[in-house]
Image (cartoon, grey):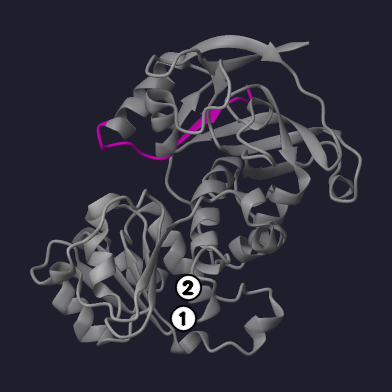
Amino acid sequence: MSQNALLLHNVGEPLALGNRPIPQPDQDQLLVKVLVAGLNPHDQRTRDIGLFVTEMPYVIASDLVGEVVTVGSGEYSARFTIGEHVFGHTFAEGGFKNEFNAAQEYALVDARFVGKVADSGLSLDEASTIPVIVLAAFIALFANSGLGLPAPFSPEATSFDYAGVTLLVIGGGSNTGRATIELARMVGIGKIIAVAGHRNEASLKAAGVTHFIDRQAPNLLERIHAITGDELVHAVDTVNTGLDQELSVAALSNTKKGTLITLRRPEGEFDSDKIGIKSAGYDRRLVFGVSPMHPEVTMGFWQNVPRWIKEKHVSASQFEVIEGLDADAVNKALDRYRDGNGVKTNIHLWQ
């Protein structure tokens, strides 16, 4: 049996509506009827430069909300029943596989890495804004390859001094920046410093920021150091790439080894005159918000995130809607990401 899907036939060309087979679930997998496929900025880079593409034609969209139609074998699949609505992201064990991507009528999901919409209290559209955004923030804070803070459900969390931690978030006004702040507040991090546009100040303080700095303010580094002194060892940059991460690195302690986690590529070497001595060194690491790469924390994330949402620790992002697998509308949404004015966009497939 075949289904409709939005397909990338050649990198750099627009997506087109086409057909592909309906997959069948293996152990600890579910087959879902896709209800919402969520677009993110990386989908534009998939189309235009081939990011994450593993085969052609390629299916885009990494946020997924679906209705379970077939339950595979295995203990994790057994937690779900036909007809339940689930939300998750589409990156699968072993790579970025078409069978799991969302811009098609039916897709597979890994039962270890999805949550139940009913347990979250969210609408289908709201649930579609959670997976890529909140998961990336969670991995940045709690994965071993991220900052490595104890995950809130870990045994270490019961005795860890979160209140003694200072966290700098560059790009606090982005969707992932806001999620990072909410998760930091949830575990009780003592100082949460956000650098963001001034229009975000009130909402970020409501989300948990203890110290807000306007990104257009003069002397940004001095303003950060006025709060942290030479003690900052935890930073997350959600928006900058390469050498534009200079402020994040410069803010780290010069005498203690600090870590910057970035969601964009960290190419290039900095001028020590601009970032400081860093006598103890520093780490600058890119992390991917991909569940199978960080199972030590992501399995617990998916089990707990519906409750965190329902308890108002984590919130959904704003979104716009495209009705149906409309290739022209989706290509225009991706063009807006390319041009720097894109917004979170959901594709409705439930008609």
Q: Does residue 234 appear in this view?
A: no
Q: Does residue 131 appear in this view?
A: yes
- Evaluate if marks 1 and 2 touch, with contact meaning CB atoms under 8 Å apart: yes
Query: Which contiguous range is marked in magenta?
Result: 339-351
Where does label 2 land, which residue?
A: 184
The answer to whether residue 167 is above or below residue 315 is below
Report the residue at 31% width, 50% height from top.
Answer: 267
Look at the image and say whether residue 297 sits in the magenta stretch: no
Q: Element at badge 2?
A: helix
Report x, y in % for residue 37. Answer: 56, 32
Magenta stretch, main secondary structure class? loop
Question: Going by the image, does 77 lie left or right of 14?
Answer: right
Q: Quadrant of the C terminus?
A: top right
Indicate which disc, 1 or 2, sits on the residue closer to the N terminus.
2
Depth check, front residue: 148 or 174: 148
Depth check, front residue: 292 or 164: 292
